[in-house]
């Protein structure tokens, strides 16, 4: 198995959303896979929608949007590193915005 660094974009969906805010999360995870071709399905299986009650009594759902980047890591690891997070940042907006606009605005696909 090879180890890959996979950059993923997640989207927060809040219902109700009285302030019309939008938050995305960019995260980089280490993923073990036999090849790059296996990664997309493995990532989709891992990042299933997660919904919880938020502080306002509504619902917040974190949803997988897209894989932004993949590259093979050549280091060797002794412990289990599958889906270990190595980087993350939240991208909050004070307006509704689409994932495509966020990717363009922050050049996330690079």
Image (cartoon, rainbow, N blue to C red):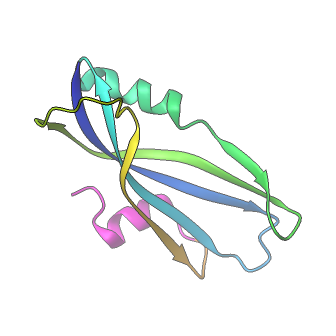
Name above or below for residue 27 compared with residue 102: above
Above or below residue 21? Residue 99 is above
Q: Would residue 96 appear left or right of 102 to someone viewing this image?
A: right
Residue 86 lies within the magenta run: no
- Does residue 102 belong to the magenta stretch? yes
Q: Is residue 104 above or below residue 60?
A: below
The residue that appears at 51% across and 63% down in the rendered structure is 24
Highlighted range, magenta:
97-110
Q: Quadrant of the N terminus?
A: top left
Quarter of the picture containing the C terminus is bottom left
Tell me the quarter of the picture where residue 38 sits.
Answer: top left
Give the image location of residue 29, x and y in percent. 36, 44
Residue 53 on image: x %, y %: 82, 56
Relative to 105, residue 51 above or below:
above
Q: How many numbered marks, from 0 up?
A: 0
Image check: 21 left or right of 99?
right
Furthest toward the left, the residue is 74
Asked which quadrant contains residue 101, the reply is bottom left
Residue ID at (39%, 42%) = 84
* Quarter location, residue 96: bottom right
Seen at 49% across and 31% down, the residue is 44
């Amino acid at each position: 198995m090879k180890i890959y660094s996979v950059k993923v974009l997640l989207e927060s969906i809040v219902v109700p959303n009285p302030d019309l805010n939008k938050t995305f999360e960019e995260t980089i995870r280490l993923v073990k896979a036999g090849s790059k071709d296996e990664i997309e399905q493995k990532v989709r299986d891992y990042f299933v929608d997660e919904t919880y009650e938020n502080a306002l009594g509504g619902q917040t759902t974190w949803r997988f949007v897209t894989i932004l980047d993949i590259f093979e890591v050549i280091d060797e690891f002794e412990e289990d590193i599958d889906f270990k997070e190595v980087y993350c940042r939240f991208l909050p907006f004070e307006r509704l915005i689409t994932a495509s606009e966020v990717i363009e605005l922050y050049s996330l696909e690079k």
